Image: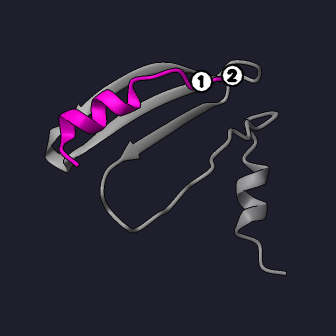
């Protein structure tokens, strides 16, 4: 599917998600989408293309309660 067709097909309503941005990624022959979940505010980034490899990643913030560095120290402590 060519890039223009993919872009037009993806520029639509996403129900529980608000389409924040859609952009052609010419160097990747892909279309990038940024969606925001209307209820929770969670953001979802999608790169749509013809690649058969399917991957996903989930990331979330875990802010520290203070700046002592304890979580980082514990991360490197052997048990």
Is 43 situated left or right of 22 in this image?
Answer: right
Please say if 51 is above or below 35.
Answer: below
* Residue 56 belongs to the span the image colors magenta: no
In the rendered image, residue 48, in percent from the top left (x then y), is placed at 37, 46
In the rendered image, residue 35, in percent from the top left (x then y), is placed at 53, 27
- Relative to the observer, which residue lies in front, 40 or 12? 12
Residue found at x 67% / y 29%: 42
Residue found at x 57% / y 26%: 14
Is 51 situated left or right of 4 in this image?
Answer: right
Is 48 situated left or right of 63 in this image?
Answer: left
Please say if 31 is above or below 20.
Answer: below
Residue 36 badge:
1
Dividing the picture into quadrants, the one containing residue 60 is top right
- Relative to the observer, which residue lies in front, 36 or 73? 36
* Residue 10 belongs to the span the image colors magenta: yes
Q: Quadrant of the C terminus?
A: bottom right
Q: Which structural element holds mark 2? A: loop
Q: Sequence order check: which comes first, mark 1 or mark 2?
A: 1
Q: How many marks?
A: 2
Residue found at x 40% / y 21%: 21
Q: 10 Å neighbourhood of mark 1: few (<14), some, or many (≥20)?
A: some
Q: Which residue is mark 2?
A: 41
Dividing the picture into quadrants, the one containing residue 78 is bottom right
Which residue is outermost to the left? 27
Residue 11 badge:
none
Mark 1–mark 2 Cα distance, whole angstroms, equals 6 Å
Contact, CB < 8 Å: mark 1 with mark 2? Answer: yes
In the rendered structure, which segment of residues is drawn in magenta?
Answer: 1-15
In the rendered image, residue 41, in percent from the top left (x then y), is placed at 69, 22
In the rendered image, residue 53, in percent from the top left (x then y), is placed at 40, 68
Q: Which structural element holds mark 1? A: strand
């Amino acid at each position: 599917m060519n890039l223009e067709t993919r872009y037009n097909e993806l520029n639509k309503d996403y129900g529980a998600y608000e389409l924040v941005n859609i952009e052609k990624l010419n160097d990747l022959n892909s279309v990038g989408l940024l969606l925001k979940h209307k209820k929770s505010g969670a953001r979802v980034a999608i790169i749509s293309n013809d690649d058969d490899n399917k991957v996903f990643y989930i990331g979330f913030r875990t802010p520290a309660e203070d700046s002592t560095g304890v979580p980082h120290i514990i991360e490197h402590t052997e048990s």
